[in-house]
Amino acid sequence: MKVAWAGSRETLELSDRMAKLVANDPVFEKFTRPMLGRKELFKNTLRKAAHGWKLIVDLRLTEEEAKWLRLYIDEPAYTDLHWGMFIPAIEGQGTEEQKKKWLPLAQKMKIIGCYAQTELGHGSNVQGLETTATFDPQADEFVIHSPTLTSSKWWPGGLGKASTHALVYARLIVGGEFHGVHGFIVQLRSLEDHSPLPGITVGDIGLKFGNGAYNTMDNGVLRFDHVRIPRNQMLMRVSQVTKEGKYMQSDVPRQLIYGTMVYVRQTIVVDASKALSRAVCIATRYSAVRRQFGSRNGGPETQVIDYKTQQSRLFPLLASAYAFRFVGEWLKWLYMDVKQRLEANDFSTLPEAHACTAGLKSLTTTATADGIEECRKLCGGHGYLVSSGLPELFAVYIPACTYEGDNVVLLLQVARFIVKTVSELGYKQPVGTTAYMGRVATLMQNNCAVRTAEDWLNPGAIVEAFEARAARMAVACGRQLAKFENPEEGFAELASDLVEASVAHCQLIVVSKFIEKLQQDIPGKGVKQSLEILCYVYALFLLHKHQGDFLAVGYLTPKQALLANDQLRTLYSKVRPNAIALVDSFNYTDHYLGSILGRYDGNVYPKLYEAAWEDPLNDSDVADGFHQYVQPILKQKLHSAKL
Ligand SMILES: CC/C=C\C/C=C\C/C=C\C/C=C/C(=O)SCCNC(=O)CCNC(=O)[C@H](O)C(C)(C)COP(=O)(O)OP(=O)(O)OC[C@H]1O[C@@H](n2cnc3c(N)ncnc32)[C@H](O)[C@@H]1OP(=O)(O)O
Ligand SMILES: Cc1cc2nc3c(=O)[nH]c(=O)nc-3n(C[C@H](O)[C@H](O)[C@H](O)COP(=O)(O)OP(=O)(O)OC[C@H]3O[C@@H](n4cnc5c(N)ncnc54)[C@H](O)[C@@H]3O)c2cc1C
């Protein structure tokens, strides 16, 4: 199962080596992180990033090894944005000449870059950005300017203190004409002493949610006062500005300017499976350690993992972690395919790549953020202790629902794609993830054939149920929209229904990709069988949770919905014996997990007890402040009898 989770034996071995390298290095200690003040915390992150880079250079790590190393260091840092967005943006939007100039500098870390798109007043609406880049043909330069307070760049990670350069998204103005938003490489700080260059105001935006958590990152604010950059620092793969001041659009679609977001959204889906699996690993191991009630004749109490309620909350999350892992693998394949096509100037699959990355980013991050919090509750009171690892994991994770596109805004993008597909059904055969809509007549007509709980253990029955629900919801939206004279007005009015239809479509993708995964050769005794059980759990859990949809569209009867729930209970009993093995298969070191409750050896209580004494409050028996503030109250002589 470890191999199935990792994707291949090579990846398992490689990631395992990197995990141990990090776990055994004292520089990467992270237990005290939530207690550090901001300055100390940030400096410590810089130290870890520097040490990580030294290891990468000294040990001549490959790009793949370096990625795993950074993952296991497990501390958000400027390097995430440098490697994760700045470099990919140049790769995707730069010309060959630009790549030749900038990529070696960035890859050797001679410059540090960030991705500066969002502004104080504008995030989701990229076309509404206010920063301007005005071409000056005399000087052959662009003038980058922040005309208003709301145009201040706000949020970019790594911008506040670390970056020397930024990829700045600004409205292009050539000859007095606006040409939409484009990306520009702008130097922010001196490469000698790191001080901000003239015309640049830059700093950190302040503390964020949670202790430690995302506060290791210097999310920044940036303003430009007529900063000049050479013309060739506009990324020019999509469109060009000539020396003479002519704006030229190539054959490449304008949307490629948003390409870095497509790339990152795809990586976020795999990352969701990592975050959720960590939380699930902690909650599952602890649920096997924790006992409550049910002692007979003085024997041990019941392990909480044996309660059906615990199982019905925990096992769907375990199944979701696996589902997200496999859909992430598929999405990575889809992205690589699109990337190759784009390089060959084939842009036909870009809309689907955009819809899939946007929708799956939204679906998986929402479920993961909710899932981490559920895991905290599954661990009872001890889950609230920072040493459980869950509060920090939650605090670090939840912005994923917002960054790289607010999750609702992204589902509305999926809705546009679905509505368009439905409206074209008469003359265009849908392909890829919308191919099922090509069978819309059948899906609207046929109803579920399930008669017994066992009938639900059939991939065909499950896929058809999810397809029928998604198709019927999409068609219903299409019919409603047709009643509006102005389509944009209709879209705005029906937005909540459209979002629900998008969720149904995205859930269908995750379920189908899990089922497709099981059609592959999966070596290892019992591995495929265990994954089949998890796949059914995932699908039937969703069906149960959203049974209102399946019933409302008239595909299921209430009886069939009840049978699905009956089957789900049986499946939980089948997951239970392997639950610990299924989370051990994530192969997480205790260092990466960062949780006393989730310790591999299960030695929870002694270690919790030990850790309590390490709290700074326990440095002395009598607290600092007692004599000043508590003792006077204790010694106070009160005159009122009532008091
Ligand atoms: C390895 C990774 C390591 C580290 C990074 C990971 C995590 C680190 C943590 C945080 C980093 C965070 C970074 C950020 O947050 S960067 C900022 C991200 N910002 C956003 O995501 C903004 C969201 N908004 C948008 O994407 C767009 O503005 C939006 C799509 C919502 C609307 O754009 P616009 O108004 O221009 O478009 P529409 O008119 O709606 O659509 C026009 C047309 O274009 C299509 N489209 C839109 N986006 C894309 C795209 N990305 N790719 C392809 N096509 C796209 C859209 O479907 C329309 O098509 P059509 O209907 O056919 O005309
Ligand atoms: C930790 C973190 C790191 C970040 N890192 C970066 C970075 O490195 N670089 C960068 O450029 N940016 C970064 N961002 C910014 C991030 O990309 C934006 O915050 C994000 O795109 C959401 O935009 P917003 O803040 O404008 O939200 P808003 O759009 O203001 O959202 C507010 C509310 O309005 C709703 N809403 C907005 N538009 C619509 C609509 N059309 N229909 C219905 N509802 C709508 C949303 O659903 C939400 O509920 C980061 C943000 C965070 C939190």
Image: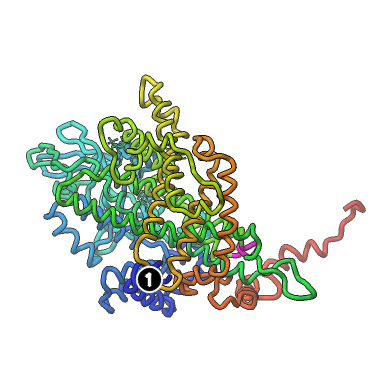
Question: Is residue 136 positioned above or below 57 on the image?
Answer: above
Q: Is residue 610 magenta?
A: no
Residue at the spot 19% in from the left edge and 50% down from the top edge: 341
> Which of the image's four quarters has the N terminus?
bottom left
Residue under the image location 46 percent in, 44 percent down: 465
Residue 277's spot in the image, x, y percent? 48, 63
In this picture, residue 96 sits left or right of residue 488: left
Q: Looking at the image, can residue 275 be seen?
A: no
Q: Main secondary structure of the magenta part?
A: helix
Indicate which quadrant contains ligand 1.
top left
| Magenta residues, start to end | 379-385
Q: 359 and 408: which one is in front?
A: 359
Residue 147: percent from the left, percent from the top?
A: 30, 37
Residue toward you, 167 or 151: 167
Q: Residue at x 17, y 50 (%)?
A: 233
Q: In which quarter of the image is residue 382?
A: bottom right
Mark 1: C-beta under 8 Å from nearest atom of ligand 1: no
* Residue 534 at least partly seen: yes
Q: In this view, does 553 lie to the left or right of 612?
A: left
Residue 516, located in which quarter of the rendered image? Answer: bottom left
Name the amino acid, label 1: Pro
In depth, the one of 557 and 235 nearer the eye is 557
Q: Is residue 261 above or below residue 109?
A: above
Q: What residue is pinned by disc 1?
A: 523
Q: Label 1: few (<14), some or many (≥20) within 10 Å?
A: few
